[in-house]
Image: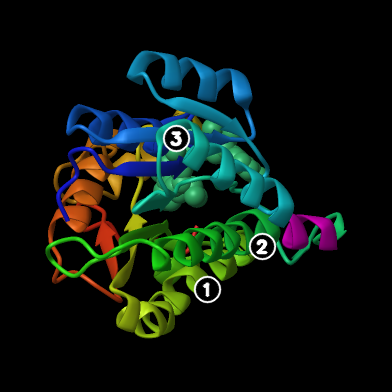
Amino acid sequence: MKINEQVALVTGGGSGLGAATARRLAAKGAKVAILDFNIDAANEVAAELGGVALQADVADQEAVGGAFDQAIADLGGAPRIAISCAGIGMAARIVGREGKMSFDVFERTLKVNLFGTYNVMSHAAQRMMELEPTETGERGVVINTASVAWEDGQLGQAAYAASKGAIASMCLPAAREFARSGVRVMAIAPGLFHTPMMEGLPEEVAAQITANIPFPDRLGAPEEYALLAEQIVSNPYLNGTTIRLDGAVRLPPR
Ligand code: NAD
């Protein structure tokens, strides 16, 4: 699908991978809505791109529905491009020295990463189905963000890996379900990227992580994620699968 003039909604667009993707789509001529819990960050990116900022928790059904309606009102149509980058990563052992992982950590991680992604995808697809198809027969493209932890989750990543594994797993059934409407669903599983999420790590942990990346032997740049998102939107034959974007990294057990 061509990007120019399309309406796009990017969750987590106030930071990291989402912000880079919003910038790339806007540079290609899309009208972009930035949905983020952090409205200050969303406002900043939206102002830079001439887009709109929307505040919502991706896990909140009503708030996300309202944000889509707002995007439609502000940008003149339903998004044909919906990209979920909002996510959280909390590390905790299932049973650690201090006892069992708090159920809250597991629940919150699944709620934001999985339920949030499902919620945004369902709101997006419903509205895409009401649109006329483009000249390629497409009504829209959904891109969800998994993680390489989907396949090689490390010690302490049970909740995170479970949430990302489910995002990868639902890609094919969602693509199959939406096929008759011309809506594609893809997922990107990033390796280790240079974003605020990673900047929070202690230096020695970051160095250890980088040492495991074969080539290029550095963290991924958010712009490289955005480049793949652009390709997925542009290439109509990409559908129903999860692409690892990781410099050949395979995460070690710890
Ligand atoms: P980030 O922390 O830089 O940005 C995440 C954004 O999501 C923030 O702006 C935050 O405010 C927003 N957000 C968080 N919870 C939200 C909620 N409930 N509702 C709405 N917005 C919310 O993170 P990032 O590194 O850009 O990561 C983006 C996605 O990529 C995440 O899903 C993450 O799990 C995934 N990922 C990142 C890496 C990496 O190395 N950075 C690797 C693999 C996967």
Q: How far is mark 3 from mark 1, CA to CA?
A: 26 Å
* Quarter occupied by residue 122: bottom right
The residue pinned by badge 2 equals: 110
- Point out the stretch of residues depicted in magenta: 102-108
Q: Secondary structure at mark 3?
A: strand
The numbered mark, 3 or 1, whose residue comes first in the sequence reads 3
* Quarter occupied by residue 236: bottom left
The numbered mark, 1 or 2, whose residue comes first in the sequence reads 2
Task: Give me the disc on residue 33.
Answer: 3
Estimate the x, y position of residue 232 in percent, counting from the top left. Answer: 21, 57
The reply to whether the C-beta atoms of the residues labelled 1 and 2 are less than 8 Å apart is yes
Q: Name the side, left or right, on which 44 lies relative to 220.
A: right
Q: How far is mark 3 from mark 2, CA to CA?
A: 24 Å
Residues packed near mark 2 inside 10 Å, few (<14), some (14 to 19) or many (20 plus): many
Q: Name the side, left or right, on which 65 lies relative to 105.
A: left
User: Between tags 3 and 1, which lies in front?
Assistant: 3
Estimate the x, y position of residue 220 in percent, counting from the top left. Answer: 27, 39
Instruction: Write the residue at 76% across / 55% down.
Output: 105
Residues packed near mark 1 inside 10 Å, few (<14), some (14 to 19) or many (20 plus): some
**Quick check: is 237 in the magenta stretch?**
no
As drawn, 31 above or below 214: above
Estimate the x, y position of residue 67 in percent, counting from the top left. Answer: 60, 42
Residue type beneath disc 2:
Leu
Estimate the x, y position of residue 72 in percent, counting from the top left. Answer: 48, 42
Task: Give me the disc on residue 166.
Answer: 1
As drawn, 67 above or below 168: above
As drawn, 99 above or below 82: below
